[in-house]
Image (cartoon, rainbow, N blue to C red):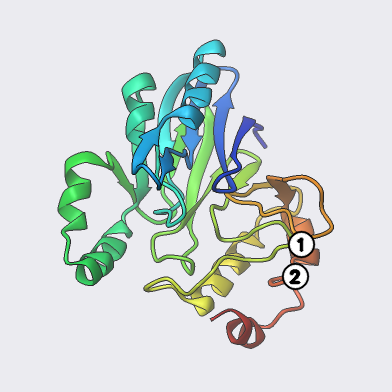
């Protein structure tokens, strides 16, 4: 199985990991789940985290093909447009973003769909759609539950799961956002658990629970199946829904 280079970038303010995923043979890469710094007190944004990614991509002489979002994030703003302006690339997310847009448009009386059409996504993925990063084969897996539009990206021997799962000692995503579903999240994780045991799994967040001294972004399928405190192989769908919904 092809093995991409994965470089992580951590924003401690939002506990978010962003990634550059590269095919070293072609120098082509993707950026996943970028962060635009936001200061709530002054209502201003900065590009400190995004500039670290820009500097790294340029230093490595990588060419950005994709700027990927696993989902729309409630805890941080995306730097996708800024990164595209500096590095190029196609900004992509699940086509089911329309469900999220319609839901929040009704709640906030704002046309999020029109807003995003004007300035946000270049490409909307269908479920299980295949693509490439350089010569490395990639595809998405729909993993709804946290939101209806969550995707996980399988790139070579690695899967990027967004908020679907956290480290085994922290568990799984919230399901209490509009259109969230613990039943769907359970089913989504079961899909991930059919991937090879040794597949690398990269997470969007880590919160360093009590007893652990460092932030960690990577685990694997086997470890999650054996040890995840919310969703290991021994947990039934009924008990998970009761705990998480």
- Disc number at residue 229? 2
Could you tell me which residue is drawn at 29 percent across and 65 percent down?
99
Could you tell me which residue is drawn at 42 percent across and 42 percent down?
39
Point out residue 92 in the picture as x, y percentages from the top left corner: 36, 42
Residue furthest to the front in view is 41
Could you tell me which residue is drawn at 17 percent across and 61 percent down?
110
- Disc number at residue 101? none
Q: Between residue 23 and residue 104, name the one nearer to us.
A: 104
- Disc number at residue 169? 1
Point out residue 243 in the picture as x, y percentages from the top left corner: 63, 83
Q: Between residue 229 and residue 186, name the one nearer to us.
A: 229
Q: Residues within 10 Å of mark 2 (few under 14, many from 20)?
A: some
Q: Between residue 76 and residue 25, name the one nearer to us.
A: 76
Residue 172 lies left or right of residue 110; in this view the side is right
Q: Quadrant of the N terminus?
A: top right
Q: Is residue 35 above or below residue 57?
A: below
Point out residue 234 in the picture as x, y percentages from the top left corner: 77, 78
Q: Residues within 10 Å of mark 1 (few under 14, many from 20)?
A: some
Residue furthest to the right in view is 211
Point out residue 144 in the picture as x, y percentages from the top left corner: 46, 66
Indicate the quadrant where residue 148 lies.
bottom left
Whole-Å distance between the Cαs marked 1 and 2?
Answer: 6 Å
| Tag 1–tag 2 contact (CB < 8 Å) | yes
């Amino acid at each position: 199985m092809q093995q991409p280079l994965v470089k992580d970038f951590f924003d401690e303010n939002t506990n978010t990991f962003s990634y550059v995923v590269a095919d070293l043979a072609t120098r082509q890469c993707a950026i996943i789940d970028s962060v635009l710094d936001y200061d709530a007190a002054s209502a201003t944004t900065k590009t400190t985290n995004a500039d670290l990614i820009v500097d790294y991509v340029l230093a490595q002489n990588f060419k950005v093909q994709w700027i990927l979002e696993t989902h729309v994030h409630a805890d941080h703003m995306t730097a996708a447009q800024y990164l595209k302006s500096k590095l190029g690339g196609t900004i992509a997310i699940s086509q089911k973003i329309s469900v999220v847009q319609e839901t929040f448009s009704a709640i906030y009386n704002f046309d999020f769909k029109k807003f995003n059409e004007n300035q946000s996504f270049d490409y909307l993925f269908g479920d299980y759609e295949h693509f490439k990063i350089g010569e490395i084969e990639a595809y998405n897996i729909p993993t709804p539950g946290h939101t209806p539009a969550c995707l996980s990206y399988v790139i070579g021997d690695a899967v990027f799961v967004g908020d679907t799962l956290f480290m085994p000692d922290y568990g799984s995503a919230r399901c209490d956002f509009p259109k969230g579903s613990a039943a769907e999240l359970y089913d989504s994780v079961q899909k991930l658990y059919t991937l090879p045991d040794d597949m690398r799994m990269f997470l969007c967040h880590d919160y360093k629970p009590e007893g652990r001294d460092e932030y960690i972004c990577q685990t694997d399928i086997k470890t999650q199946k054996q040890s995840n405190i919310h969703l290991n192989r021994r947990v039934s769908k009924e008990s998970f829904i009761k705990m998480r919904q």
